[in-house]
Every structure is written in C-alpha cells, then in structure tokens.
Amino acid sequence: MKGIDPTVRRETLYIAAWTLLLTALMEAVFLILSRWTLPVLWGGLFGAFAAVLNFFLMGLTVQKAVGKEEKDAANLMRLSQMGRMLLLVAVGLLAALIPFFDLIAALIPLFFPRIAVAVRPLFERKKQN
C-alpha cells in the first residue's frame, strides 16, 4: 500500500485536535458537576482515541476507493462502514464491561468528529473574508 495521502493526514489531525479539545471540555463539565473520576478520564481518552481512529480508517478507505471502479468503490466503502461500526460497538461494550472506563465518558467523544466537521465551515468562511 502506498503512503497516507496528505489530505487524509491533514483532516485526521484536524479531527484529532477538535476531539481532544471537546474531550477536555467534557472532562471539565464532569469536574464542575462533581462527577469527575479516573474512569471518566480514561473513558474520555478511550472514546476520543476510538473516534479519531474511526475517522482515520474512513479516510484510508476513501483514499483506497478513489482508484477503483464505482461498484468496487461502493462495496469497499460499505464493508469499511460495517467494520468501523463494529469497532465502535466493541468500544461501547468494552467501556460498559470494564470498570476502568466510564461508559458515558467513553461514548460522548464518539460524536465529536461530527461536531468538528459541522463547525468547520464557520472557520473556513472567516479565512476567506
């Protein structure tokens, strides 16, 4: 396999930065609510890692699908989505079964990449003006 495309690397770093920032904010909310514990910390980090890994794997799949026929690319994307969904389910199950992790703190960061993607246009417009 050829190397990681610079766009995949750049976008993954963007998602990782936002995910870590939002995870730190989540940890602060747990602290303010007097609900912060070490399992909250580890659960948040575990969920953040899984979220960034999921995005990175999606980027690699898109990179791989670009050179394929439309049908093959669609099948590859479908298979990748199923595998990544199973990964996220496994993360949730591990967080639920292992007391080292707080389940809620592990699940919330899984939504942070979506938030990062949603707010990106707000910052892109400011750059263009």
Image: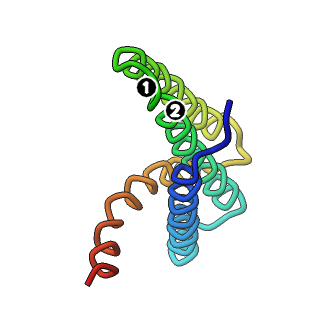
Question: Which amino acid, mark 1?
Answer: Met
In percent of the image, x 48 and y 29: which residue is there?
85
Give the crowd class for mark 2: few <14, some 14-19, many >=20 residues within 10 Å. some
Label 1 neighbour load within 10 Å: few <14, some 14-19, many 20+: some
Residue 48 is situated, as x and y percent measured from the top left of the image, at: 59, 54
* 2 or 1: tag closer to the N-terminus: 2
Disc tally is: 2
Comparing 52 with 57, the one in front is 57
Helix, strand, or loop for circle 1? helix
Nearest the viewer among 122 and 41 is 122
In the image: residue 129, left or right of residue 79: left
At a point 38% along the width and 53% down the height, the residue shown is: 114
Query: Amino acid under label 2?
Result: Thr
Residue labelled with disc 2: 61
Question: What residue did someone put label 1 on?
Answer: 77
Give the residue displayed 46% in from the left and 20% down from the top. Answer: 76
Residue 68 in the image, given as x and y percentages of width and height: 45, 22
Q: Is residue 1 above or below residue 100?
A: above
Nearest the camera: 52 or 99? 52
Depth check, front residue: 15 or 105 = 15
Q: CA distance from mark 2 to mark 1?
A: 7 Å
* Rendered position, 68 above or below 29: above
- The quadrant of the image that shows the C terminus is bottom left
Residue at the bottom extreme? 129
Q: Are marks 2 and 1 in contact (CB under 8 Å)?
A: yes
**x, y percent for residue 81:** 45, 27
Q: Left of 88 or right of it: where is 102?
A: right
**Residue at horizontal 67 percent and vertical 61 percent from the top:** 41
User: Image quarter for residue 74?
Assistant: top left
